[in-house]
Amino acid sequence: MQIATRTEGQRAVLRLSGRFEFSAHREFREAIDRVLAQQGIDDLVVDLMDVDYVDSSALGMLLMLRERANSAKLGLVLANPRGMVRQALDIAHFEKLFVIS
Protein backbone atom coordinates (compact mmCIF):
# COMPACT_ATOMS: atom_id res chain seq x y z
CA MET A 1 0.00 0.00 0.00
CA GLN A 2 1.08 3.56 -0.62
CA ILE A 3 0.10 6.57 1.47
CA ALA A 4 0.24 10.15 0.23
CA THR A 5 -0.40 12.93 2.73
CA ARG A 6 -1.39 16.48 1.95
CA THR A 7 -2.78 19.40 3.92
CA GLU A 8 -5.59 21.60 2.67
CA GLY A 9 -5.95 24.43 5.16
CA GLN A 10 -7.09 22.84 8.43
CA ARG A 11 -7.75 19.48 6.78
CA ALA A 12 -5.24 16.67 6.39
CA VAL A 13 -5.87 14.13 3.64
CA LEU A 14 -4.38 10.65 3.63
CA ARG A 15 -4.77 9.12 0.18
CA LEU A 16 -4.29 5.37 0.33
CA SER A 17 -3.72 3.17 -2.69
CA GLY A 18 -3.31 -0.55 -3.25
CA ARG A 19 -4.03 -3.30 -0.77
CA PHE A 20 -4.76 -2.09 2.77
CA GLU A 21 -3.78 -5.06 4.89
CA PHE A 22 -1.73 -6.07 7.91
CA SER A 23 1.59 -5.50 6.16
CA ALA A 24 0.78 -1.76 6.02
CA HIS A 25 0.21 -1.32 9.76
CA ARG A 26 3.55 0.35 10.54
CA GLU A 27 3.41 2.73 7.57
CA PHE A 28 -0.22 3.62 8.37
CA ARG A 29 0.54 4.26 12.05
CA GLU A 30 3.53 6.45 11.15
CA ALA A 31 1.42 8.49 8.71
CA ILE A 32 -1.22 8.98 11.40
CA ASP A 33 1.45 10.02 13.92
CA ARG A 34 2.74 12.66 11.47
CA VAL A 35 -0.75 14.05 10.89
CA LEU A 36 -1.59 14.17 14.60
CA ALA A 37 1.68 15.99 15.31
CA GLN A 38 0.71 18.85 12.97
CA GLN A 39 -0.68 22.01 14.53
CA GLY A 40 -3.89 23.54 13.23
CA ILE A 41 -5.47 20.38 11.81
CA ASP A 42 -9.19 20.09 12.58
CA ASP A 43 -10.24 17.35 10.18
CA LEU A 44 -8.75 14.19 8.76
CA VAL A 45 -9.94 12.61 5.52
CA VAL A 46 -8.87 9.08 4.62
CA ASP A 47 -9.31 8.84 0.85
CA LEU A 48 -9.94 5.22 -0.08
CA MET A 49 -10.62 5.75 -3.79
CA ASP A 50 -7.53 3.84 -4.92
CA VAL A 51 -7.74 1.06 -2.32
CA ASP A 52 -8.80 -2.18 -3.96
CA TYR A 53 -8.68 -4.53 -0.96
CA VAL A 54 -9.02 -4.35 2.82
CA ASP A 55 -8.62 -7.16 5.33
CA SER A 56 -9.79 -7.37 8.93
CA SER A 57 -6.59 -5.81 10.24
CA ALA A 58 -7.18 -2.78 8.00
CA LEU A 59 -10.62 -2.39 9.56
CA GLY A 60 -8.93 -2.60 12.96
CA MET A 61 -6.46 0.11 11.95
CA LEU A 62 -9.36 2.36 10.96
CA LEU A 63 -10.95 1.76 14.37
CA MET A 64 -7.65 2.64 16.04
CA LEU A 65 -7.53 5.80 13.94
CA ARG A 66 -11.07 6.67 15.04
CA GLU A 67 -10.04 6.45 18.70
CA ARG A 68 -6.96 8.59 18.15
CA ALA A 69 -8.89 11.17 16.11
CA ASN A 70 -11.56 11.37 18.82
CA SER A 71 -8.88 11.85 21.48
CA ALA A 72 -7.35 14.65 19.41
CA LYS A 73 -10.82 16.14 18.77
CA LEU A 74 -10.42 15.78 15.00
CA GLY A 75 -13.25 15.24 12.58
CA LEU A 76 -12.74 12.03 10.60
CA VAL A 77 -14.14 11.07 7.20
CA LEU A 78 -13.64 7.90 5.18
CA ALA A 79 -13.95 9.13 1.61
CA ASN A 80 -14.59 7.43 -1.71
CA PRO A 81 -14.67 3.73 -0.78
CA ARG A 82 -15.48 1.64 -3.85
CA GLY A 83 -16.31 -1.94 -4.69
CA MET A 84 -15.05 -4.53 -2.24
CA VAL A 85 -13.81 -1.84 0.14
CA ARG A 86 -17.26 -0.26 0.38
CA GLN A 87 -18.79 -3.70 0.83
CA ALA A 88 -16.42 -4.51 3.71
CA LEU A 89 -17.25 -1.20 5.43
CA ASP A 90 -20.97 -1.89 4.99
CA ILE A 91 -20.72 -5.44 6.34
CA ALA A 92 -18.83 -4.14 9.40
CA HIS A 93 -21.49 -1.39 9.88
CA PHE A 94 -18.81 1.29 9.82
CA GLU A 95 -21.47 3.83 8.81
CA LYS A 96 -22.49 3.76 12.48
CA LEU A 97 -18.98 4.74 13.57
CA PHE A 98 -17.64 6.93 10.76
CA VAL A 99 -18.75 9.58 8.35
CA ILE A 100 -18.43 7.86 4.97
CA SER A 101 -18.67 9.98 1.86
Image (tube, grey):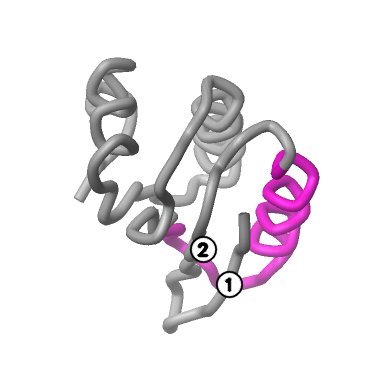
Amino acid marked by disc 2:
Leu
Please give the range of residues in magenta.
Answer: 24-45
Q: Is residue 44 magenta?
A: yes
Give the residue displayed 50% in from the left and 69% down from the top.
Answer: 12
Give the residue displayed 70% in from the left and 58% down from the top.
Answer: 31
**Residue 30 image-quadrant placement:** bottom right
Measured Cα–Cα span from mark 1 to mark 2: 5 Å
Magenta span dominant secondary structure: helix
Give the residue displayed 66% in from the left and 53% down from the top.
Answer: 32
Look at mark 2 in the image and give the residue it sits on.
14
> For numbered disc 2, what is the local secondary structure?
strand
Q: Is residue 32 magenta?
A: yes
Residue 61 position in % (x across, y down): 60, 32
Q: Relative to residue 62, is residue 75 depicted above or below?
A: below
Q: Name the mark on residue 5.
A: 1
Residue found farthest to the top: 92
Give the quarter of the figure containing the N terminus.
Answer: bottom right
> For numbered disc 1, what is the local secondary structure?
strand
Amino acid marked by disc 1:
Thr
Give the residue displayed 75% in from the left and 52% down from the top.
Answer: 27
